[in-house]
Image (spheres, rainbow, N blue to C red):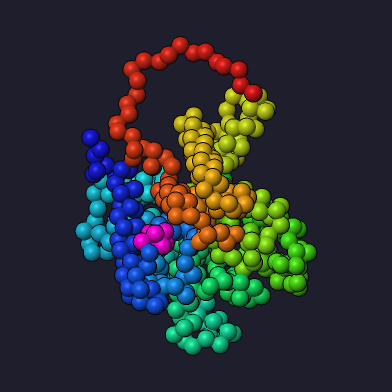
Amino acid sequence: MLRLRDPIRLIPLLFAALILAGMILLSLPIATADGTRAPLLSAFFTAVSAVSVTGLIVEDTPVYWSTFGQSVIMLLFQIGGFGIMTAATLFGLMVGRGFGLRERLATQVERSRLESGDAVSVLKLVLLITLVVETIVALILTWRFVTAHGMSLSEGAWHGVFHSVSAFNNAGFSSFSDSVMGFQTDALILGPIMLAVILTALGFPVMQDLRRHKFSWRHWSLHTKITVAGTGGLLLFGFFATLAMEWSNPDTLGPMGLGAKVLNAAFHSVMPRTAGFNSLDVGSFQDGTIMSNYFLMFVGGGSAGTAGGIKITTFFVLFAIVLSEILGRSDAGIFGRRFGRAIERQALSVTVLAATLIFAATTYIAMVSPLPLDDILFECISAFSTVGLSTGITADLPPSAQIVLCLLMFVGRVGTITVATALALGGRERPYRYPEENPIVG
């Protein structure tokens, strides 16, 4: 029988419970701007997108949802990004109850491979960084909205807090109908959002390592080295790809000056990897830019953070495996360290499961929708990788396709390995091994 108290099985159930609670709240008449009840599917889709910190929407957030509804959405992506088990553990710490081994194990599952002895210090770091970063970004954005864009203090504070929490949790929800397209030339709006997204996309284990060892490269763990180096490389790739391909596009960077082009290309090198805000019309991107976004979204950000995708470490483990095979080496590794076989199998499993789910979802949606295949593929990768960028087709998809996107977002947030393990009913190691025989490969 499925043991509900097993942490690795409990986490998906808690995420599902939060989605259910969010759906119920968003179904209340007070949650909509016109006071009518939202359709059940709209409330469900929005709750899933918020809890999974994705940002895909079927209703215009500031127009359709009331202040109460938007507050519920913000609370959902705050809890979703923070991690249900992490939030529960922090609550226990704040009221002085402490936590036991089971809670430690649950936290490790949610935050991916944290040592149990580090759980308390990491959780305190998570709380501290959350409060500090969200507060600083909210203050900067509020100041800018009020002083440069003519908003009242209350209006500026609301937009500042909403975007700060959304950026920190990589949620991509915006309290503006056009996301942040109205601030294409304002570096003091786009810049803080970018920095918040990059920070949390690194993952909390990297933050812990940086806190301990500062910028001493040789003392960093292999995980930190791969994540930091990989993040830098992907940001540069996204920046130059967007800048080059959209430079003359009259619907995106074309009409802008040099400074604005650089700013928006930098912004869109960050967002496809996890966050989902857009300062440019994604539906007007060149095909080459869309292709580069496929790659950036699929890889995603750092492990054990709020980013989605297969994660940077997974991608670099697979890259190292391929490189070692090409060079005829028996071991795969990077930065003077080799990978264990278990990590190699895990990286391969995550990638294959992700690709299979995206392929299956894309195939189904293409069957039930007349929309272009490239837009559907973009939507599916964005959903699984909890990115939230869209070419604008989300609301036009049939109900069954929207439900498929919900499944992709849920699995993408909880994690393919966690879900697969949660569904397993007690697999055990076989007491025997079959004879070895190798098929022809390639």
Q: Which residues are magenta?
A: 40-47
Residue at position x 36%, y 15% in the image: 432
Q: Position of residue 321 (x, y in %)?
A: 59, 32
Q: Is residue 127 visible?
A: no
Q: Quadrant of residue 6?
A: top left
Residue at position x 33%, y 52% in the image: 16
Residue at position x 33%, y 17% in the image: 431
Q: Is residue 101 magenta?
A: no
Q: Quadrant of residue 53?
A: bottom left
Q: Is residue 46 magenta?
A: yes
Q: Position of residue 369 (x, y in %)?
A: 54, 51
Main SS type for the magenta part?
helix
Residue at position x 60%, y 35% in the image: 320
Which residue occupies the foreground of this view, 330 or 163? 163
Q: Is 338 drawn above or below residue 151 in the view shown?
A: above
Q: Position of residue 311 (x, y in %)?
A: 52, 47
